[in-house]
Image: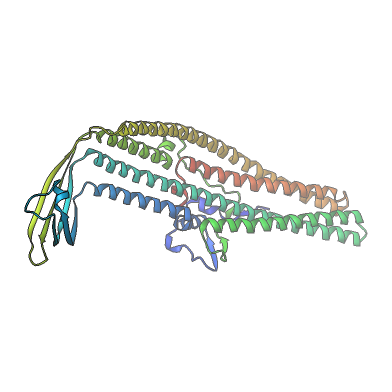
Amino acid sequence: MPLVFAGFAAFAGSAYSQDTIPPQSGTLHLTLHAAVEMALRQNPQVQIAALNLAESVQNKNVARSELLPQAKLEASDAVVRANLDAEFGGSFAGLPQHLGPFQVFAAGPQFSMSVLDLSLWRRWQAAGENVNASDADRESVREQITLLVVSQYLGCLRAAADVRAAQSRADLAKALYDQANDLQQHGAGTGIDTLRSNVELRNETQVLLVAQTTERTSLYGLAQLLNADPNATITLDDALSFFETPDANIEQSLAAAYAARPEMRALAAQERAAADEKRAVSESRWPSMRIVGNWDYEGLSSTTGIPTYNYAVVFDAPIFTGGRIHAENILSDLELKKIAQQRQDLENQIAVDVKTAAAELASARSEVDVANQGVSLAQQEVQQARDRFSAGVANNIEVIQAQDALARASDNQITALYSYNQARADLARSTGQMESLYAK
């Protein structure tokens, strides 16, 4: 009897639009595609990654502001009394010791603008690369959440298949028990045959209860990943024959994986940002120049003032920084070396991930074929053993053994299909194609 495995239709690329995502209350009818879309909209880790990207964009704006003109408006109304002896270092004949008190009113704009400061320019470039790194980190989080949702969804489908298989075996055990009991009532069977059938029925009933609990807890885990309403009931709407496994259609080359993995792009952006920071440190030795000035309405009161102004070009040339620039250069070199080591480690990890997932995918495909054959043979064995027992040719030991063989074959079939689809998801994640395969 073929086992129906709900949920694998999405692997064939079913169409889906965001406005078909169900509300988070009542019953959520989810395809795999819809579950991924919901997680990418609502999962807290995805939201945090988006906020980190927004923060890096504003940090870039802050760095850019240092290159743009700055202006502010100031106003003051002060009372001044000064000690002339302290100001000039002594007293003067005929002059009082103090000046004032008198009122001073001033109001007007002040401004400044950097004309030449290469270090500020480099830091703005580094902030732009940090935005690219944050964007790549966001994509990496989305890829990882997609993998977690797909894996959990597959786990729910596997649990549902286990429930259906366990239910089917429990129904079969009940029918065999009824058959053995009927034969005993008509004197064609023995009590031990009925007892064996009853024990097998109890065992299969227990397996069914465990499978049902596993299905419920798997759905709870999926709801958590989706950030769905805890009170909502999730129903998996995908339905496809258990034997129909989707094609991989995934570029498996390492070159493609290195280019597509967002972690690699994040490291590349971090490396460029670190290089810009290093140049900014080196160029902080160079002179900088800026324009500053102010225009004020100044007087002894707000009604007696006159316009005043002050404009200047400020030239700044570092002479001695106490070793700060040298130390910052060393820190920049260390950061670049650390990123290079991280890149090498990531490349090695990606190579292992791609090769492992590809090997597991090829193996799982063969396992599915073998498992399907095993289920078919086990079903034939059960039928023949049942016929022999009904005809009185053999006792029901053969039937019990055939039931056990069918249970193992069903478990192998479910495990093989789960392994195939999980390996397919692992290969997509290792090559950076997770979201493009399951969410678009």
Look at the picture and state if 231 lies above or below 194: below
Which colour assignment does the render follow?
A: rainbow
In this view, which residue lies farthest toward the right? Answer: 187
Residue 50 horizontal side relative to residue 355, left or right? left
In this view, which residue lies farthest toward the bottom? Answer: 26
Q: Nearer the viewer, residue 263 or 363?
A: 263
Residue 368 horizontal side relative to residue 399, left or right? left
Residue 337 horizontal side relative to residue 421, left or right? left
Q: Nearer the viewer, residue 250 or 233?
A: 233
Residue 186 lies in quadrant: bottom right
The percent position of residue 9, horizontal first and vertical second, equals 53, 54
Q: Is residue 238 visible?
A: no
The percent position of residue 83, horizontal first and vertical second, equals 16, 53
Residue 130 lies in quadrant: top left
At 18% from the left edge and 50% from the top edge, which residue is drawn? 69
Residue 40 horizontal side relative to residue 408, left or right? left
Q: Is residue 262 visible?
A: yes
The percent position of residue 336, horizontal first and vertical second, equals 38, 33
At 40% from the left edge and 54% from the top edge, which residue is drawn? 51
At 88% from the left edge and 52% from the top edge, which residue is drawn? 392
Residue 200 lies in quadrant: bottom right
- Number of marks in the rendered image: 0
The percent position of residue 75, horizontal first and vertical second, equals 18, 61
